[in-house]
Image (cartoon, grey):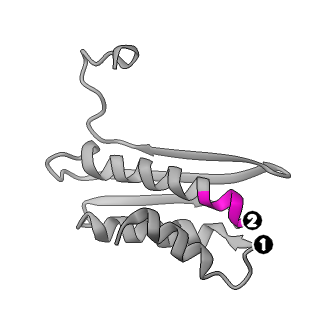
Amino acid sequence: MNQWLYIHEKLYQSQDLARIDFADYIQDLVTNLFYSYNVNSSAITLKMNVEEVFLAIDTAIPYGLIINELISNSLKYAFPSREPGEISIGFCSLEANLFTLTISDNGVGFSQDFDFQAT
């Protein structure tokens, strides 16, 4: 299934569109991505440090799209030979309507000669 459609479908299935359990949503989204990319979860582990936060759907959708893109990029490029690795996701509320999202992996990274300012 197209991940963009999955994000919207999953969010709109919520019982209360004003309050989405974002921790559950992130877990479902990432599980779906691992399945879509046929990832062996014993080779690439997922570490989540996600607070129980309830978001309105208009806030959850952009976060879902960002998470989808970053995790997809990690799964496609960070572990090119399917070597073991780890993807970490953190999400917490700093104050009302202010959140921190952190996504990282310990994959191959950029090549030494990569110039991100020239791309």
Please provide the residue range marked out in magenta.
Answer: 57-61
The residue type indicated by label 2 comes to Ala
Q: Nearer the viewer, residue 32 or 1?
A: 1
Mark 1 Cα-neighbour bin, 10 Å: few <14, some 14–19, many ≥20: few
Q: Residue at x 78, y 72 (%)?
A: 18
Whether tag 2 and tag 1 are in contact, CB under 8 A, the answer is: yes
Quarter of the picture containing the N terminus is bottom left
- Residue drawn at x 30%, y 41% is 107
Say which residue label 2 marks.
56
Looking at this view, is 16 or 108 the one in front?
16
Mark 2, secondary structure of its residue: loop
Q: Which of marks 2 and 1 is nearer the N terminus?
A: 1
Identify the residue shown where x is 58% and y is 52%. Answer: 90
Please tell me which residue is depicted at 76% across the width and 72% down the height of the picture: 19
Q: Is residue 8 above or below residue 90?
A: below
- Residue 50 position, x and y percent, is 62, 60
Residue 59 within the magenta-colored segment of the rendering: yes
The answer to whether residue 94 is left or right of residue 15 is right
Q: How crowded is mark 2: few (under 14 residues within 10 Å), some or many (20 or more)?
A: some
The amino acid sitting under disc 1 is Ala
Residue 50 is covered by the magenta coloring: no
Seen from this angle, which residue lies furthest left? 81
Q: In this view, does 66 lie to the left or right of 100?
A: left
Question: Does any portion of residue 41 appear in the rendered image?
Answer: no
Q: What element carries label 1?
A: loop
Q: Residue 18 carries which label?
A: 1
What label sits on residue 108 in the rendered view?
Answer: none
| Residue 118: percent from left, percent from top | 35, 14
Can you name the residue that lies furthest to the bottom here? 15
